[in-house]
Amino acid sequence: MPDTVQSAERATGLPYERPIGSTIAMSGATGFLASHLLLRLLPHDTRVVALVRKPPHRALASLACALRSAGAPAETVARIHHQVRAVQVCLDRPQLGLTEREFAGIADSVDAVWHCAALTKLHGAAEELHRTNVEGTRQIIALATAGSRRPPLFHISTAFVAGAQLEGVVPERQLECTHGFLTPYEESKYRAENLVHHWARDNSRCATVFRPSVLLSSRRALPRAPQHTYAVLAAKLALFLRHSLHGLPGPAPSAASGRAGQLVVRLLGAPDSGINLLQVEYAALAMLRLAGRPPSEPGASVHHIVHPVETPVERVNDALQRSVPRLRLELVADRPDPTGLERAVDQYGAEATAYLGLRRRYERSSLADLERRRLASPPAPIDSAYLDAVLSPPAPAR
């Protein structure tokens, strides 16, 4: 965990300003971001009803692995056994696929609902994205609605609901589709967030929407632990390159040849574009700080969880090239004849290659207020040294 995050947490003791709730329901608890949230919540005796896809014993094992990978000490991991109850659900089915009694029991037992689960395939099938991201959100809202304690809802959206707005500053209060969308994923998250806003407004309920940008960590992920986007992309690029150069079993896309045996991959984008990257440790702390604020009035509040400085895409590409030897990435405005390798990268590496033409920035007034009040230190720069650590290979299996 970066020193800036540790010092901010030591300064106030708790990771939030007031108790968020003694018992919370959380979807997506075994994921990359959620594991960092639980890393900070479990030591403060928060009990968790983890809404998971896997059978409970497998889900708890996955959560333990995710927590260890996030840097949790052994005593925090051990808390899983008496603070976390895993419940297998079908996110997109009515009542989460549970019986009426099971559903009501969970709804009446929690003080807050955190919705972290999502399908993040940028160019996934629209129907599948809608089923998980939109209908899944609808069922989580139903859970929050059914609860006799009227629990607040904390919904993880994405900064990319801004869609195809390529330039300018994106306000935190803005949620519109006038620019269209660059990917089906963005549209599904836009529709999901709309459900949250309408629910909070129409029912005089409290909801908090967090819109994180691309979250990273310089920690080396453990085998089978959740990984961030760029670690996955680097692994895919290395695999594509190996297949192309050595003809190993698997896809063997053709590629343009570079200098001294390099393979050139041309990516559609602009040399002066930037992408917002943020340390997940900072994001988790900031979300919990903001979640602990008492709501001023019913409705949905929105917070961009973003870095104050956009990272130049060229800097990211340079780091990817250092992490995958013999690969050269080139940003081009037009590519009329893509090679097989380039088509493969477009298809399977879209999580990081879909946003190479952005020149926009994001309002971050909520985070600026936290930093001004010394409840969070500003995030460290996303420089070349940090990106090299981010893209280092995962830890070897033991």
Image: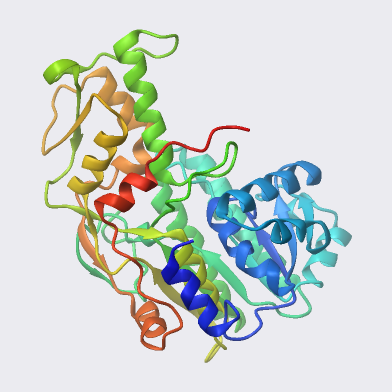
Q: Is residue 282 left or right of residue 99?
A: left
In percent of the image, x 58 and y 50: which residue is there?
A: 31
In percent of the image, x 26 and y 58: which residue is there?
A: 179
Q: Is residue 353 visible?
A: yes
**Front residue (pair 67, 277):** 67
Position of residue 292 measured from the top left corner of the image (x, y, whole percent): 57, 82
Q: Is residue 197 visible?
A: no
Which residue is situated farthest in the right direction here? 101
Q: Is residue 85 left or right of residue 343?
A: right
Position of residue 370 measured from the top left corner of the image (x, y, whole percent): 42, 82
Position of residue 333 measured from the top left corner of the image (x, y, whole percent): 11, 39
The figure's colour scheme reads rainbow
Location of residue 48 by image quarter: bottom right
In percent of the image, x 54 and y 69: which residue is there?
A: 196
**Image mark count:** 0
Location of residue 257 by image quarter: top left
**Front residue (pair 380, 225):** 380
Position of residue 13 measured from the top left corner of the image (x, y, whole percent): 59, 81
Q: Is residue 41 left or right of residue 319?
A: right
Please state, as top left, top right, bottom left or bottom right, where the C terminus lies in the image: top right
Relative to residue 353, is residue 361 depicted above or below? below
**Front residue (pair 295, 205):** 295
Q: Is residue 103 left or right of residue 131?
A: right
In percent of the image, x 42 and y 85: which residue is there?
A: 374
Relative to residue 119, is residue 379 depicted above or below? below
Relative to residue 224, is residue 25 depicted above or below? below
